[in-house]
Image: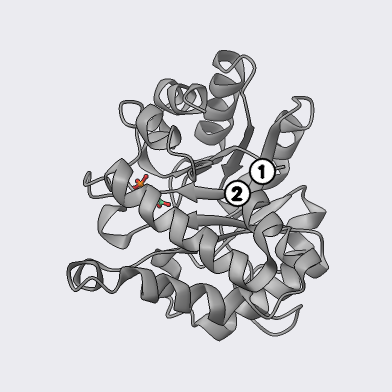
Amino acid sequence: MRQKIVAGNWKMNKTLDEGLELIKAVLDKAEKPKGAVVFATPFIHLKDAAKLLKVRRGFHLAAQNCHHEEKGAYTGEVSADMLVSVGAEFVLIGHSERRQYFKETNAQLAQKVNLSLSRNLRPIFCCGEPLAVREEGRHVAYVAKQLKASLFHLSEQQFRQIVLAYEPIWAIGTGRTATSAQTQDMHASIRTLIAKKYGTQVADDTTILYGGSANAQNAVELFSQPDVDGGLIGGASLKPDDFVAIINAL
Ligand code: PEP
């Protein structure tokens, strides 16, 4: 069964106190979400956030990144084991900002995926094309390459733990949301690709989120597309009322 998810990616926003207030406000306002709700907080929030979330069914915690090596001399980095030890259940892998600013490669992302899965940390794996690629009509092939390079070495059992997030780079933080038709087309292509590799049952069961300027106004239409199973939300996840409206759009 395909799981519906709304995940909020706070990026590098909110002090610890502000972040905990935000979670409390969302927990107060969100009554019975129709799917799972995930907060991807900065690392330092995770331990305290986990205490707030563990008493509420359906609410989960994610980190925004983890290092691709198990441990060692990587000053300033955080390992998958550390994330699990403070209560993270999911981890964002391959966000376009990490690919762009931190030069993360498909091969490193594959290592992060492997390590996370080995620790029972579920990857929310992000993919998506830049504007020039979309304009040239190469977006489906571009995303297929990202998925093949970082995920298609996994066994079926491992792949079933992955949540995908299609995030066209031109839509992230720009206010230029992909249309529901563009989103549906890409999600359907991704599902077809998964079906070819892992079979139709796995493809049907895979959660594929949309991310890129999703908000309280457009979430209902985006989430009503047959292959869209929720969203990865950046800016709008920082405002409790907006985030709850998006959760209610599931
Ligand atoms: C994101 O960063 O994953 C994202 C989707 O951001 P925004 O919603 O702000 O476009």
Q: Nearer the viewer, residue 154 or 88?
A: 154
Q: Is residue 166 visible?
A: no
Q: Give coordinates of residue 161: x percent, y percent.
A: 73, 58
Q: Give coordinates of residue 209: x percent, y percent.
A: 50, 48
Image position of 117 (left or right of 3)? right
* Residue position marked by numbered label 2 in the rendering: 207
Tell me the crowding category of disc 1: few under 14, some 14 to 19, or many 20 or more residues within 10 angstroms, Cα based: few
Tell me the crowding category of disc 2: few under 14, some 14 to 19, or many 20 or more residues within 10 angstroms, Cα based: many
Q: Give coordinates of residue 52: x percent, y percent.
A: 71, 29
Secondary structure under tag 2 reads loop
Residues at marks 2 and 1 touching, judged by CB atoms closer than 8 Å? yes
Q: Give coordinates of residue 34: x percent, y percent.
A: 62, 25
Residue 132 lies, with reference to residue 224, above or below; the image says below
Q: Nearer the viewer, residue 90 or 179?
A: 179
Residue 215 lies, with reference to residue 182, above or below; the image says above
Q: Nearer the viewer, residue 243 or 137?
A: 137
Marks 2 and 1, Cα distance to the nearest angstrom?
A: 6 Å
* Residue position marked by numbered label 1 in the rendering: 2
**Label 2 vs 1, first from the N-terminus:** 1
The disc labelled 1 sits on which kind of residue? Answer: Arg
Residue at 38% x, 75% y is: 141
Question: From the Cβ of disc 1, is ligand 1 less than 8 Å away?
Answer: no
Residue at 42% x, 80% y is: 103
Residue at 61% x, 54% y is: 43
The disc labelled 2 sits on which kind of residue? Answer: Thr
For the N terminus, the quadrant is: top right
Q: Is residue 51 visible?
A: yes
